[in-house]
Image (cartoon, rainbow, N blue to C red):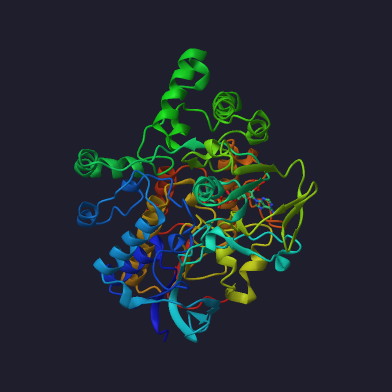
């Protein structure tokens, strides 16, 4: 008999809520395993300067408890990492979750035992544990991508990756800092580091678009208005494409004259945030429409950055706006007007190696005391593959996903019975405001397990045919958008050398996806085989 009904890996937004549901709604015996020394998931690890969510705080939160929603007061439009950690800590305390969470414990392997109809989970510090259900809540952006640059070991200074930021922080005072990477992370970190360091050199491989976040404190009046309309806000988020509760314009960027278009972009630029993408209906679908937004942002960069050579190097030309995850910022482009900041264009002179004294590009040596890698993550698949999962009939996830992730609805992979993945590849995940996707997935999994228990069923699995059809649909949904056009996007796995180039998240829209999952459940879990015991053959 397995010791636990369910083992969940990860104590971030997903793991905490999944634990609450399985334990407190279904009465299951559940354990959460967490590598960090506290809850928080992504926000436990990402403590770099400027780390802030780019969903707005009042809807980057759980909706399942109205009491929680009313009692928690967010302080700013966008929550800073420490505030999100405090929120998740509060959730863990409020729902008495900590007693079922084993911290400082890393999963080293997970194996399906067909005869025992159970998962055996090996850990680095608590031996092997068994459970009927194995639920991965490991996040999409938790496996740090540290590029293999020759000579890193020889560096005489300190180096850090933003996704594994030291808890004690990093003191940049009086230091010469090199920052590699200009994704959301580098763009958030650069202005804050520049304000503290003696000098900051930003090493840019691909110039990026960025929209001002217009972050600000949330005043009482605004907060009360939010609290009063929370139900409507949540409903709107769930009914949307991206899990954000704002309206997407129904007008094509090509159906208004240039003056009106510019006025609307100006307004959206002043409002700030990811909703800039919603200025027109077709920015993510039509290349000509997108070009109007891309050009507008290029114009802004040219207007903000005083040195024309730097401005030109910062101007993104090789991909359409928002085909990569669009960052939002506080004074990113303005930072390059500071005397203590320099931009290095790696397209012109790539990094050759790291030496004791700093980073050497094809041009010269940049002398540095600290190197910050804002080089992103082995996204979506990396955290799952790190669990060393083996399934039924000798299957191993690393081999099964060698050509790209394969799943049915992003929830289950064939040959891995009773294993569920929260916000994994093949689900909307990173294309949404994450808590919306997380609540939908965990609620679906909870209902599925409740159904199995009510029917006396112990095993659920999907088939190769279902996975093949779903992977094809994920691909088709991506190609209905401009998202696959960014060559170096982590959505495609293109940021990690050797990773298969497959568009991983489901781009068909959050509400549409939730509808599919609901239909599948209503049809008796169509595409899944639910059974009493071990299946043979
Ligand atoms: P991203 O978006 O993957 O950005 C990583 C950045 O690091 C990007 O500019 C990369 O350039 C750069 N990079 C990666 N490897 C190298 C090497 N070897 N040399 C130079 N530059 C490199 O990660 P983030 O952490 O910024 O953001 C991840 C998500 O977190 C974000 O999208 C939000 O959803 C939250 P490239 O573009 O590949 O040329």
Q: Is residue 284 left or right of residue 241?
A: right
Which one is nearer the viewer's eye here, 461 or 500?
500
Task: Point out the image quarter for the N terminus.
Answer: bottom left
Image quadrant of residue 162? bottom right
Which one is nearer the viewer's eye here, 282 or 134?
282
Find residue 230 and report its horizontal and vertical position in percent. Answer: 24, 44
Which one is nearer the viewer's eye here, 196 or 249?
196
Find residue 167 and report its horizontal and vertical position in percent. Answer: 46, 67
Q: Is residue 103 left or right of residue 387?
A: left
Q: Residue at x 60, y 67 (%)?
A: 385
Q: Is residue 344 above or below residue 400?
A: above
Task: Point out the image quarter for the C terminus.
Answer: bottom right
Q: Is residue 414 visible?
A: no
Find residue 476 and report its horizontal and vertical position in percent. Answer: 59, 42
- So how many labels did they put on this image? 0
Q: Is residue 400 left or right of residue 457?
A: right
Find residue 509 and report its horizontal and vertical position in percent. Answer: 46, 42
Q: Residue at x 71, y 68 (%)?
A: 153
Q: Residue at x 72, y 45 (%)?
A: 346
Q: Is residue 322 visible?
A: yes
């Amino acid at each position: 008999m397995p010791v636990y009904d369910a083992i969940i890996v990860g104590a971030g937004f997903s793991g905490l809520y999944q634990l609450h549901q399985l334990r407190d709604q279904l009465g299951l015996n559940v354990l959460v395993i967490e590598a960090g020394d506290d809850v928080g998931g992504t926000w436990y690890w990402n403590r770099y300067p400027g780390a802030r969510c780019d969903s707005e705080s009042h809807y980057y939160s759980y909706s399942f408890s109205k009491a929680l929603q009313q009692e928690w007061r967010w302080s700013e439009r966008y929550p800073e990492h420490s505030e999100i950690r405090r929120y998740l800590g509060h959730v863990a305390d409020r729902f008495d979750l900590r007693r079922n969470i084993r911290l400082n414990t890393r999963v080293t392997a997970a194996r399906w035992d067909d005869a025992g109809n159970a998962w055996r989970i090996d850990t680095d510090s608590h031996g092997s544990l068994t459970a009927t259900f194995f639920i991965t809540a490991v996040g999409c952006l938790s496996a740090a991508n540290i590029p293999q640059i020759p000579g890193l070991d020889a560096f005489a200074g300190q180096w850090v990756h933003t996704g594994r930021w030291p808890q004690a922080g990093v003191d940049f005072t009086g230091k010469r800092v090199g920052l590699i990477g200009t994704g959301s992370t580098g763009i958030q970190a650069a202005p804050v580091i520049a304000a503290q360091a003696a000098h900051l050199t930003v090493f840019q491989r691909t110039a990026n678009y960025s929209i001002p976040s217009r972050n600000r404190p949330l005043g009482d009046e605004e907060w009360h208005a939010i609290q009063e309309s929370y139900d409507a806000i949540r409903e709107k988020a769930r009914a949307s494409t991206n899990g954000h509760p704002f309206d997407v314009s129904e007008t094509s960027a090509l159906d208004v004259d240039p003056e009106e278009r510019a006025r609307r972009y100006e307004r959206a630029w002043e409002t700030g945030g990811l909703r800039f993408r919603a200025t027109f209906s077709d920015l993510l679908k039509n290349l000509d429409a997108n070009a109007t937004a891309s050009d507008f942002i290029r114009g802004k960069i040219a207007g903000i950055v005083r040195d024309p050579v730097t401005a030109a190097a910062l101007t993104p030309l090789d991909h359409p706006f928002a085909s990569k995850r669009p960052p939002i910022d506080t004074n990113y482009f303005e930072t390059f007007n500071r005397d203590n900041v320099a931009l290095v264009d790696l397209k012109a002179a790539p990094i050759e190696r790291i030496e004791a004294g700093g980073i050497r590009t094809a041009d010269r040596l940049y002398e540095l005391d600290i190197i910050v890698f804002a080089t992103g993550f082995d996204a979506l698949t990396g955290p799952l593959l790190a669990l060393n999962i083996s399934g039924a009939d000798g299957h191993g996830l690393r081999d099964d996903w060698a050509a790209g992730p394969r799943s049915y609805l992003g929830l289950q992979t064939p040959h891995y019975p009773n294993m569920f993945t929260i916000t994994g590849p093949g689900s909307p995940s990173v294309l949404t405001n994450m808590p919306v996707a997380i609540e939908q997935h965990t609620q679906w999994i909870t209902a599925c397990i409740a159904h199995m228990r009510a029917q006396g069923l112990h095993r659920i699995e999907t088939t190769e045919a279902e996975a093949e059809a779903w992977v094809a649909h994920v691909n088709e949904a991506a190609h209905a958008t401009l998202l696959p056009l960014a060559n170096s996007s982590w959505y495609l796995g293109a940021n990690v050398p050797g990773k298969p180039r497959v568009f991983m998240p489901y781009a068909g829209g959050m509400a549409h996806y939730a509808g599919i999952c609901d239909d599948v459940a209503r049809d008796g879990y169509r595409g899944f085989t639910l059974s009493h015991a071990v299946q043979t053959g």
